[in-house]
Image (spheres, coloured by chain):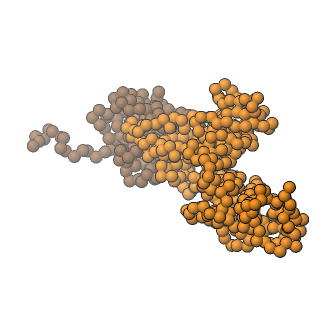
Chain colours: A brown, B orange
């Protein structure tokens, strides 16, 4: 059926683990999950529809503003701004991060919560939050 | 004038044994000793016994228009001791030793009160023997009980008895009336004041949306006047008093106000209230298509508990809706990320994560115990 040039039926390449511990991982936070300028820890755990993958934008490929613009203008989703932690900070919470480029979003990646239950994910999110808060909102 | 009945106009003399032992259980009564404010319930209990006894006397003596002179004074109860194992005040009866029998109206009154409480506790009807005109007297007895508290009525030296709770009290009062009295202790705002009529109108945090009227006296006049501002925009105050509750509509007015006190944390409370108003406005799919709006019961519960925490010097938390319809309060304190989640199923989930060590503490906490919740949060602070 294919002539070898059509890769639609080919298995997706494995996600690449991010190794640069200093790389920023941008996270958009919904306005309802921000009070007094501080995000909820819930914003740093995946929701049910995320299936264990906490979406982030890779700081090595996009700026905080670009990540915000893509999220709000292209994806038409709500964001109070861009916060960030690093690959290394996620690792200290024993969370690995992966690149997962999408057709319209080559900077897309995720922090891997797939093996964790709801409560364990909540614990991990509480370890990510202070890094994001210490760094402050990066955009706007 | 009616003549005193033999034995009813008595002098105080010796004890003739325990009349009743009122075992106070739950809430404030689970600790050591007996809270002094509970003494008012002993006074109310005696008034109830006397009141029911009067009705029993009238029924037994239809030819008499009133009870004998000195009838009420003839019931003399003394608090002899408070037994341990919850607080158990023992009321002993003192009486002229010349009286031959204890089987008088007061003893019968004690027993029919106990039978009435037992009947309602068991889901049955009010016993026929209980005088209907005396039901209103339950308005006083038990008025200070909180939802988790009760009074076990033990006659004489009995080792057990029916448990009189706020729900049973309400059922008894509402048997023949539309309204009942209940103590109120809440935060509210003064919206109007009428100095000529010595009254005001107040809106309570957990009361009806429409302000209710409240009488003023020499003590409450000044603080109410001080916080009154146009359009009810003055600072919130703590209001305690006795409210008149309708069976269906809830609080309809205040019968009396004991205290109007300024709040140390009025500004923080206002911010908390404002935040809850925001959460109450969330609609289905509030998080870009995901998210159940917070359940109204959960919101109400969380509002109450988190406001109570301010009284325990707990910092105002950041408050967020959860996707499942709950409410989560979060604190960042002294190297810990702490949260208390009011789940839609009525449970509470508390967690504290140590940022440096990555360890967590997840105690089981009860929703109706703000003191323990406060201890949990403050432990991280200290």
Q: Name the residue at 37% across, 50% down.
A: A114
Given residues B63 and B303, the one toward you in this image is B63
Could you say where residue A9 lies in the image, as x and y percent from the top left?
18, 44
Relative vertical location of residue B25 with respect to residue B207 in this rendering, above or below = below
Q: Name the residue at 85% across, 67% down.
A: B7
Given residues A79 and A64, the one toward you in this image is A79
Q: How many marks?
A: 0
- Quarter of the image with the N terminus of chain A is top left
Given residues A130 and B380, the one toward you in this image is B380
Could you say where residue A37 lies in the image, as x and y percent from the top left?
53, 33
- Does residue A56 appear anywhere in the picture? no
Residue extending furthest front? B63
Indicate left or right for B150 with B102 as reference: left
Q: Name the residue at 73% across, 61% down.
A: B62
Residue extending furthest bottom? B100
**Residue A107 position by quadrant:** top left
- Does residue B29 appear anywhere in the picture? yes
**Residue B78 position by quadrant:** bottom right
Could you say where residue B213 lies in the image, as x and y percent from the top left?
67, 36
Could you say where residue B326 lies in the image, as x and y percent from the top left?
48, 46
Indicate left or right for B293 with B243 as reference: left
Indicate left or right for A14 with B140 as reference: left
Q: Name the residue at 32% across, 41% down.
A: A100
Relative vertical location of residue B8 with respect to residue B147 in this rendering, above or below = below
Indicate left or right for A77 with B249 as reference: left
**Residue B113 position by quadrant:** bottom right
Given residues A60 and A72, the one toward you in this image is A72
């Amino acid at each position: 059926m294919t002539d070898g040039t059509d890769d639609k039926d080919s298995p997706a390449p494995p996600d690449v683990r991010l190794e640069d511990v200093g790389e920023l991982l941008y996270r958009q936070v919904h306005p309802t999950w921000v009070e007094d300028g501080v995000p909820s820890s819930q914003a740093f755990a995946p929701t049910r529809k995320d299936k264990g993958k906490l979406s982030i934008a890779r700081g090595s490929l996009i700026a905080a503003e670009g990540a915000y613009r893509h999220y709000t203008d292209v994806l038409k989703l709500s964001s109070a701004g861009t916060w960030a932690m690093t690959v290394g900070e996620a690792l200290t919470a024993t969370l690995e991060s992966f690149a997962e480029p999408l057709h319209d979003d080559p900077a897309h990646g995720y922090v891997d919560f797939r093996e964790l239950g709801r409560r364990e994910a909540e614990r991990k999110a509480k370890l990510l939050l202070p890094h994001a808060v210490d760094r402050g909102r990066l955009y706007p | 004038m009616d003549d005193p009945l033999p034995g009813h106009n008595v002098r105080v003399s010796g004890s003739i044994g325990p009349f009743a032992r009122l075992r106070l259980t739950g809430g404030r009564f689970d600790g050591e000793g007996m809270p002094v404010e509970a003494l008012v319930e002993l006074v109310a209990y005696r008034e109830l016994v006397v009141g029911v006894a009067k009705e029993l006397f009238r029924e037994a003596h239809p030819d008499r228009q009133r009870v004998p002179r000195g009838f009420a004074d003839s019931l003399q109860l003394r608090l002899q001791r408070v037994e341990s194992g919850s607080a158990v005040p023992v009321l002993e009866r003192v009486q002229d030793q010349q009286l031959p029998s204890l089987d008088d109206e007061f003893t019968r009154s004690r027993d029919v009160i106990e039978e009435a409480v037992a009947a309602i506790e068991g889901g049955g009807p009010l016993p026929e023997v209980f005088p209907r005109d005396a039901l209103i007297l339950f308005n006083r007895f038990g008025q200070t009980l909180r939802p988790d508290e009760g009074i076990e009525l033990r006659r004489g030296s009995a080792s057990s008895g029916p448990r009189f709770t706020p729900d049973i009290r309400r059922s008894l009062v509402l048997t023949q009336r539309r309204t009942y009295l209940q103590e109120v202790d809440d935060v509210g705002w003064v919206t109007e004041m009428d100095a000529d009529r010595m009254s005001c109108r107040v809106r309570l945090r957990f009361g009806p949306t429409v302000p209710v009227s409240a009488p003023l006296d020499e003590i409450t006049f000044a603080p109410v006047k001080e916080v009154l501002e146009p359009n009810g925009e003055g600072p919130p105050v703590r209001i305690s008093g006795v409210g008149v509750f309708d069976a269906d509509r809830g609080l309809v007015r205040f019968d009396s106000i004991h205290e109007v006190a300024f709040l140390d944390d009025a500004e923080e409370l206002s911010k908390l209230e404002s935040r809850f108003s925001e959460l109450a406005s969330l609609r289905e799919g509030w998080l870009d298509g995901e998210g159940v709006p917070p359940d109204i019961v959960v919101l109400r519960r969380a509002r109450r508990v988190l406001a109570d925490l301010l009284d325990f010097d707990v910092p105002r938390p950041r408050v967020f809706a959860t996707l499942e319809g709950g409410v989560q309060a979060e604190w960042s304190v002294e190297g810990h990320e702490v949260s208390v989640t009011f789940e839609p199923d009525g449970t509470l989930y508390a967690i504290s994560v140590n940022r440096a060590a990555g360890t967590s503490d997840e105690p089981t906490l009860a929703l109706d115990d703000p003191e323990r919740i406060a201890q949990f949060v403050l432990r991280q602070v200290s």
